[in-house]
Amino acid sequence: MLDPEISDISRIQAELLVGQLLVSGQNDYFVSCLDTIICDHPNAGTVLLGDFNRMRDSSLLSYPLKQVVRQATRGDANLHKVYTNISDWYERPDLLPKIGRSDHDAVIMTPKSKRPVERTKD
């Protein structure tokens, strides 16, 4: 049986927008796409993530988004960031060691839960 607090989440947030920035330097295009989507879906939960080493925060922080990664992800720099308007749904992000040949630490966000969700057997 599902936890009623978790299964009723659609009543709280019916839409979820997840976007990833793969290529830095295309700030105007990225913000233009975000603006179009937010205008069409103003109540959507939003999670934007990626390598933001060349993108200034000011354009993203003009939306009701919060940058939640506080630790350095490459040397002393915080390059992998997560911007969201649903930060209260997640625990504080953790870092994992570099994967493969990457020179950046990986970021993991764990959903909050008051109690474990019981799974049904098929």
Image: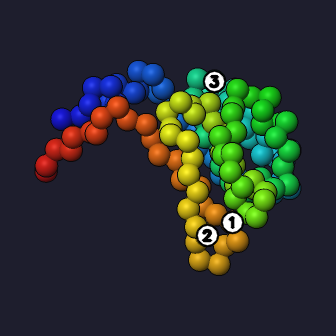
Which x, y percent locates residue 103?
A: 70, 71
In the image, what residue occupies the spot 55% across and 42% down? 92
- Element type at mark 3: loop
Counting every numbered tag in the picture gives: 3
Amino acid of disc 2: Lys
Q: Which residue is tagged 3? A: 42
Q: Which residue is tagged 2? A: 98
Q: Which residue, as the protein is rendered here, is positioned at the far left?
A: 122
Task: Depth check: give the residue in front, 46 or 53.
Answer: 53
Q: Which residue is tagged 1? A: 104
Query: In the rendered image, which quarter is residue 115 located in?
Result: top left
Amino acid of disc 1: His
Task: Depth check: give the residue in front, 37 or 21.
Answer: 21
Amino acid of disc 3: Pro
Let me know if residue 11 appears in the view. Answer: yes
Which x, y percent locates residue 60?
A: 78, 36
Task: Depth check: give the residue in front, 12 or 74.
Answer: 74
